[in-house]
Amino acid sequence: MKYLVMIYGSQADYDAMNGKGSAGHPAWGEKDLQAMFQHMESVNNDLAESGELVDGQGLTPPKQAIVVTGGADGAAVVSDGPFGETKEVLAGYWVLDCASDERVTEIAKRVYECPVPAGAPASDIVIRPIQEGAPDK
């Protein structure tokens, strides 16, 4: 079965990774970034080797987002980010082809264990099965 494994973050997380810390989001140093990249590279390499990796990408900061919503007249309205009312946004994802819910959960736990600087929040990981074919009635 295919799964979408999503990792969440906030603009404050992106800022902290670029050296601009804030309350609850300490600035990341070069060693912190290297540890994070090494961890994620190890996960990605193992998933590619096992044949479970279909795709995976990190996403740009929320301030680069474009959102299309409905206006008062129902017409589409295009807005730029960041959006103050949004606490967390999708920061990256993997599309995985795994044998079971247990296996994809094991992978998500490994992603969750990515090193972060002391005092920095860990990113939430959400797993969603990808529906293939018509939905069951």
Image: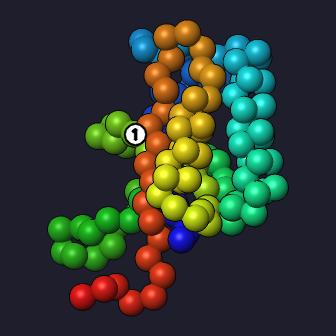
Q: Is residue 71 above or below residue 37?
A: below
Residue lying at 70% horizontally and 60% vertically, measured from the top left: 53
Q: Residues within 10 Å of mark 1 (few under 14, many from 20)?
A: some
Q: Position of residue 51 (x, y in %)?
A: 75, 63
Q: Nearer the viewer, residue 15 or 136?
A: 136
Could you tell me which residue is drawn at 19 percent across and 74 percent down?
A: 73
Q: Residue shown at 60%/20% (left/top)?
A: 116
The amino acid type of the residue labelled 1 equals Glu
Q: Describe residue 70's horizontal placement relative to residue 13 as left or right.
A: left
Number of numbered discs on residues: 1
> Does 21 appear above or below 114?
above
Residue 72 in the image: state x and y as whole percent. 18, 68
Q: Is residue 35 left or right of residue 76?
A: right
**Looking at the picture, does residue 108 appear above or below residue 121?**
below
Colouring used for the render = rainbow
- The quadrant of the picture occupied by the C terminus is bottom left
Residue 135 point in image, percent of width and height: 34, 85
Q: Please identify the quadrant where the N terminus is shown.
A: bottom right
Q: In x, y percent, where is residue 47?
A: 73, 53
Q: Say if residue 10 shows up in the picture.
A: yes
Residue beneath the point at 81% across and 55% down: 49
Q: Which residue matches tag 1? A: 88
> Disc 1 on helix, strand or loop?
loop
Q: Nearer the viewer, residue 49 or 65?
A: 49
Query: Residue at the left extreme?
Result: 72
Vertical arrangement, residue 30 with respect to residue 88, above or below = above
